[in-house]
Amino acid sequence: MLAALAAAIVVDAPQQNAISLAGRQVSMVTILPTADAHVESFHRCLDAVARERRYLAFVEAPPVAALREFVRAIVAAGAIQVLALDGDIIVGWCDVLSRPMEGFRHVGVLGMGVAASHRRRGVGEQLAKAALEQSRAAGLKRVELEVFASNRGAIKLYEKLGFEHEGVKRFARNLDGAYEDVVLMAVVWEPSRSTATNAPAG
Ligand SMILES: CC(C)(COP(=O)(O)OP(=O)(O)OC[C@H]1O[C@@H](n2cnc3c(N)ncnc32)[C@H](O)[C@@H]1OP(=O)(O)O)[C@@H](O)C(=O)NCCC(=O)NCCS
């Protein structure tokens, strides 16, 4: 088990193709649509972020086979998931999955993460911008997300991208002996209130 872990760490050693732009380190990653070919590397990235036990709603990735099915379903449905590739290693992801129920299909739910080795280098912003551009082009009118209140970096990123705060779910998680609030955020593009069916009567 430890040997396998060590091998995974060596295989996933960050390549750090980075340049300095205006005094800021920026990773030279490729943003590309999700694909079967990247599932194993994506799985290592997802699992590593989950195991930090701070940022995601799950504390380990699903099995590789389940993630493969998920990725295949996304590709088959033409749904939105982008990956960040550094060399041949996946170092981040962002998906916007539209809600399937009638009446909610204009809504997408955003989830994302970047490997710890590649944070604060512009990767998250590139991923989220690409996924949001695709969401808008696909006709979504609202993208929403949930973020732990302590995750100040992610909240700053979402604010920078135009997300607004919509509310807080108090004491939403209890993990490792600590409660966490969950912040609800969303960005809304040009919906017409005139078509709203819940407008006040009279
Ligand atoms: C949140 C996350 C995706 C941001 O990705 P990133 O690649 O580190 O972010 P970027 O370098 O693209 O930063 C873009 C902007 O986000 C904000 N930001 C990101 N991390 C920040 C931090 N730690 N502190 C303050 N602001 C931060 C800044 O506004 C930044 O713009 P700036 O560099 O002009 O100041 C990344 O930190 C991450 O994966 N965290 C763990 C998983 C996670 O939190 N996922 C989201 C769950 S809701």
Image (cartoon, helix red, strand yellow):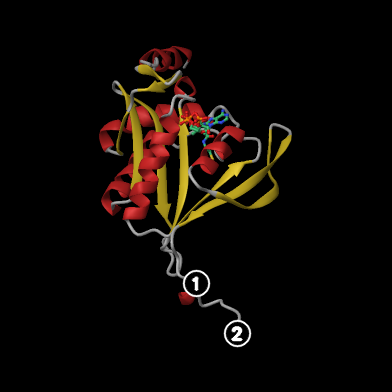
Q: Residue at x 63, y 47 (%)?
A: 183
Instruction: Give the answer, above or below, for where 57 lies relative to 199.
Output: above
Query: Around disc 1, counting alpha carbons within 10 Å, would you say few (fewer than 14), some (14 to 19), or many (20 or more)?
Result: few
Q: Residue at x 56, y 40 (%)?
A: 57
Q: Quadrant of the C terminus?
A: bottom right
Q: Is label 2 in contact with label 1 (beta carbons under 8 Å)? A: no
Spatial CA distance of label 2 from label 1 is 14 Å
User: Helix or strand or loop: what does disc 1 sit on?
Assistant: helix
Instruction: Give the answer, above or below, for where 8 lies relative to 82.
Output: above
Which residue is denoted by mark 2 in the rendering? 201
Amino acid type of the residue that numbered disc 2 sits on in the rendered structure: Ala
Q: Nearer the viewer, residue 143 or 104?
A: 143
User: Helix or strand or loop: what does disc 2 sit on?
Assistant: loop
Q: Quadrant of residue 192?
A: bottom left
Q: Position of residue 4 (x, y in %)?
A: 42, 16
Disc number for residue 193: 1
Query: Around disc 2, counting alpha carbons within 10 Å, would you say few (fewer than 14), some (14 to 19), or many (20 or more)?
Result: few
In the rendered structure, the answer to whether residue 47 lies left or right of residue 82 reads right
